[in-house]
């Protein structure tokens, strides 16, 4: 197990460049009403981790705190030897470049073409002027086309994003995230806006692509069946705390009741 | 990982980033060329510009501090402008509504809408100042000319937008009121007006704004209000009084804008 | 059901009070204005005859007048309007960005920018023209500057509103990927705002063509001075020619704007 040396705040033990350590994360949107009540989590630098739980329990908040789309109230998020919770400005941007994110509503720039949306994943590596003139490195353009093919959208490069179906847009979203060559992939309810069949296809795609590049994935998902099918590890949250942490095979119906039903999530 | 079968796959297989549309580039180039051409045509040179900046500096120096000593005259003329705006808006809206209704092609036959629309087009085409000049020649100097000119401007704007709003309503709602055997005016009241009311408030408050703005300058051509005082002060080189007048005009317009924004917010 | 429950009132008591207050306010304003404004009733009654007389004197328009004087002045008017709109594009965008609360989160800057926008549009184009004639001397430079400055307030306000109405989603995605702020602007905001921007520019250009026609009245170039001359010399047939040509240009501008709108936006 990784131990953290308090004096130097670096990890000792087997170093995993892609591991994430969340310690005592607290988030209050309104003072005195915490949504996250001291969540602690360690992600080894590999595998698919699915976070499940009822709405409002802080799954999305947890994911978004990691790349600081939401500001944590207190706690630490250690990644690459840095505390993400306290980065600012240039350092924060540099950290974000290494973390890819897939969104529930896809969040593509509708009026740009598919290929341009893919290249948005490399915006952190290109000056604004070059980006405006669309002068991306050849290597990036080549990779973009490769990724397009890998997500099954070969030939769609010059289509405008708003001409695509929901499933196709999410494929572009996944490709964009992978374009960053990230060390961590976050997914915030990536299948909630899709029909069941497409949801399975998207999950398969994410799992395959991330596995191919050895990128650890943290998925916030509310469909338990999908979580059990695709994840290596399931983290169950309830009332802003982690109440289950283990492989899908260990997830019993009682555990599910603890997470979703009964008094557990009514507790303050 | 096949792509969705339903969406068409474009034939292009190129691996290059598509260049920005040459049409767009041509457009920017044409614009730049035009600017150079027009600048030379209008005799705009750097010398004149710099000379002007010098004059401008002296000018501003003479305007500050503003001279409010003749505030009674100022207030009196400002009041006249307000009266012109109020009366023009009131009567303008009153007259514009039936004309707009007559111009709506889904409500009236062609032989009624055609002359109504022609009248509206004529009212719209001329700048209120030009109309004011004509009215001054016809009815003499003073507020009457200003009021009549702004009534014409209001008709041009409000009747047009009112007609457009009526043409965009759902005829199904009108039909259902008609089917109940209601007389024409009731059909208007219950079927048409509710659908156009909020848009009506929108453009009426916009025209109120506009009337206030123009009422402050119709005086320059003899239409009453503070414009005449402003122009006279200018010609006397009484620049600090000019500044005082300008500041009061800006203050008046700001108050009117806040008022009409409030009006829009309440009714929408 | 109790009798009280069966009653229906269209407006709540507060709404009725508010409505009544507005009604009272409007009536008061109109009555007060009617009583204080200096309008001689005889002039009002005489007005239709006078207007008719004026039109009688203007007909028919003097067509020979056109090529000599009117045509060049008309072209100058259009150039003033177009050049002024182009300059406004350059000036209004930064101010609009400052005023947009999602781009500039500092309230002080927002207020400053809004103040600039309100002031520039509160001052009528004609007044701007007078000011610039005093600064730059008579001619088209003053007119162009007047058009440009007046339009900043209009374009800037609508532009800021368009920017504030963009979807947050794509912006979030770009920020999450570590894109620098300028790239978020060009790749996230601009593609969303672009059609609205061009629509606003076209709209303002249309209005500016109308506004440019009168600038000559105060010496700022364009056809206004031709009109002024003809009116001062009581050459009503020539006045008619000028008016008709202004009308034609305005109609042409509107047709052009509608055509461009359909194709590009």
Image (spheres, helix red, strand yellow):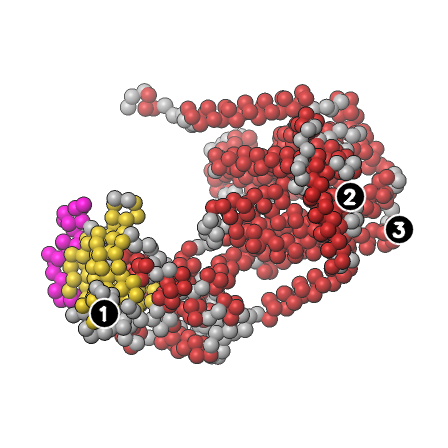
Rendered image quadrant of residue B110: top right
**Precedes in sequence: disc 2 or disc 3:** 3
Query: Which residue is under mark 2?
Result: C218
Q: Residue at x 84, y 40 (%)?
A: C231
What mark, if any, has residue A28 been given in the picture? none
Graded by Cα atoms within 10 Å as few (under 14), some (14 to 19) or many (20 or more), the crowding at tag 1 reads: some
Q: Chain of mark 1?
A: A
Query: Which residue is under mark 1?
Result: A11
Rendered image quadrant of residue A233: bottom left
Q: Position of residue C235 (x, y in %)?
A: 88, 41
Q: Same chain for marks 2 and 3?
A: yes
Q: Chain of mark 2?
A: C
Report if residue A117 is visible in the image. yes
Q: Same chain for marks 3 and 1?
A: no
In depth, the one of A71 and B92 nearer the eye is A71
The magenta segment is A247-268
Front tag of 3 and 1: 1
Query: Which residue is under mark 3?
Result: C64
């Amino acid at each position: 197990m990784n131990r953290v040396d308090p004096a130097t705040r670096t990890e000792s033990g087997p170093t995993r460049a892609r591991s994430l350590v969340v310690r005592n994360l607290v988030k209050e949107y309104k003072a005195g009403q915490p949504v996250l009540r001291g969540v602690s989590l360690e992600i080894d630098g590999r595998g698919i981790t699915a976070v499940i739980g009822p709405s409002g329990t802080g799954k999305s908040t947890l994911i978004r705190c990691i790349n600081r789309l939401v500001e944590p109230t207190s706690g630490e998020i250690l990644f690459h030897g840095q505390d993400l919770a306290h980065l600012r400005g240039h350092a924060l941007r540099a950290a974000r470049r290494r973390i890819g994110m897939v969104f529930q509503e896809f969040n593509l720039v509708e009026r740009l073409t598919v290929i341009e949306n893919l290249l948005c994943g490399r915006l952190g590596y290109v000056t604004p002027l070059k980006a405006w003139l669309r002068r991306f490195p050849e290597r990036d353009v080549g990779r973009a086309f490769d990724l397009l093919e890998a997500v099954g959208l070969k030939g769609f490069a010059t289509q405008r994003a708003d001409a695509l179906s929901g499933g196709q847009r999410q494929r572009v979203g996944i490709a964009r995230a992978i374009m960053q060559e990230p060390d961590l992939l976050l997914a915030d309810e990536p299948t909630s806006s899709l029909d069941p069949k497409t949801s399975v296809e998207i999950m398969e795609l994410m799992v395959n692509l991330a596995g191919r590049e050895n990128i650890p994935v943290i998925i916030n998902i509310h469909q338990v069946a999908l979580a059990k099918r695709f994840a290596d590890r399931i983290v169950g949250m309830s009332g802003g705390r982690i109440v289950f942490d283990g492989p899908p095979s260990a997830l019993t119906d009682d555990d599910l009741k603890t997470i979703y039903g009964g008094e557990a999530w009514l507790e303050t | 990982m096949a792509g969705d079968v339903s969406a068409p796959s474009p034939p292009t297989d190129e691996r290059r980033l598509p260049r920005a549309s040459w049409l767009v580039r041509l457009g920017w180039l044409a614009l730049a060329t035009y600017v150079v051409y027009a600048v030379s045509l209008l005799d705009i040179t750097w010398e004149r510009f710099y000379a002007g900046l010098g004059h401008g500096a002296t000018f501003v120096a003479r305007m500050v501090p503003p001279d409010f000593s003749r505030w009674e005259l100022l207030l009196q003329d400002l009041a006249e402008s307000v009266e012109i705006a109020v009366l023009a808006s009131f009567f303008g809206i009153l007259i514009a509504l039936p004309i707009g209704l007559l111009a709506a092609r889904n409500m009236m036959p062609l032989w009624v809408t055609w002359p109504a629309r022609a009248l509206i087009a004529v009212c719209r085409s001329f700048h209120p100042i030009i109309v004011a000049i004509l009215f001054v020649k016809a009815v003499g100097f003073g507020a009457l000319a200003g009021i009549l000119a702004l009534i014409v401007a209001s008709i041009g704007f409000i009747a047009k937008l009112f007609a457009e709003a009526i043409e965009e309503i759902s005829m199904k709602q009108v039909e259902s009121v008609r089917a109940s055997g209601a007389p024409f005016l009731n059909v208007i009241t219950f079927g048409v007006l509710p659908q156009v009311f909020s848009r009506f408030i929108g453009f009426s408050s916009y025209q109120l704004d506009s009337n206030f703005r123009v009422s402050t300058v119709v005086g320059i051509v003899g239409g009453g209000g503070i414009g005449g005082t402003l122009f006279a002060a200018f010609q006397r080189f009484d620049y600090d009084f000019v500044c005082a007048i300008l500041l009061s005009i800006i203050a008046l317009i700001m108050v009117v804008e806040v008022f009409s924004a409030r009006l829009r917010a309440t009714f929408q | 059901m109790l009798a009280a429950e069966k009653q229906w009132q269209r407006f709540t008591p507060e709404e009725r009070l508010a409505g009544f207050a507005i009604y009272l306010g409007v009536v008061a304003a109109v009555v007060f204005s009617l009583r204080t404004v200096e309008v001689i009733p005889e002039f009002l009654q005489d007005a239709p005859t006078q207007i008719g007389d004026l039109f009688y004197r203007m007909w028919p328009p003097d067509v020979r007048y056109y090529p000599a004087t009117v045509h060049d002045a008309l072209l100058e008017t259009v150039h003033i309007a177009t050049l002024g709109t182009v300059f406004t594009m350059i000036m209004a965008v930064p101010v609009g960005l400052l005023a947009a609360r999602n781009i500039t989160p500092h309230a002080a800057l927002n207020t400053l920018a809004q103040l600039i926008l309100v002031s520039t549009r509160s001052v009528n184009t004609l007044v701007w023209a007078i000011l610039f004639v005093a600064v730059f001397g008579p001619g088209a430079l003053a007119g162009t500057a007047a058009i440009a400055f007046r339009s900043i307030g209009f374009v800037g306000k609508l532009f800021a509103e368009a920017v504030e109405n963009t979807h947050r989603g794509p912006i979030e995605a770009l920020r999450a990927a570590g894109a620098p702020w300028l790239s978020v602007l060009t790749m996230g905001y601009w593609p969303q705002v672009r059609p609205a921007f061009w629509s606003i520019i076209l709209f303002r250009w249309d209005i500016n063509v109308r506004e440019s026609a009168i600038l000559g009245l105060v010496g700022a170039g364009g056809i206004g001075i031709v009109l002024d001359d003809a009116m001062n010399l009581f050459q009503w047939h020539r006045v008619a020619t000028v008016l008709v040509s202004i009308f034609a240009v305005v109609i042409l501008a509107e047709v052009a704007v509608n055509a461009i709108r359909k194709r590009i936006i």
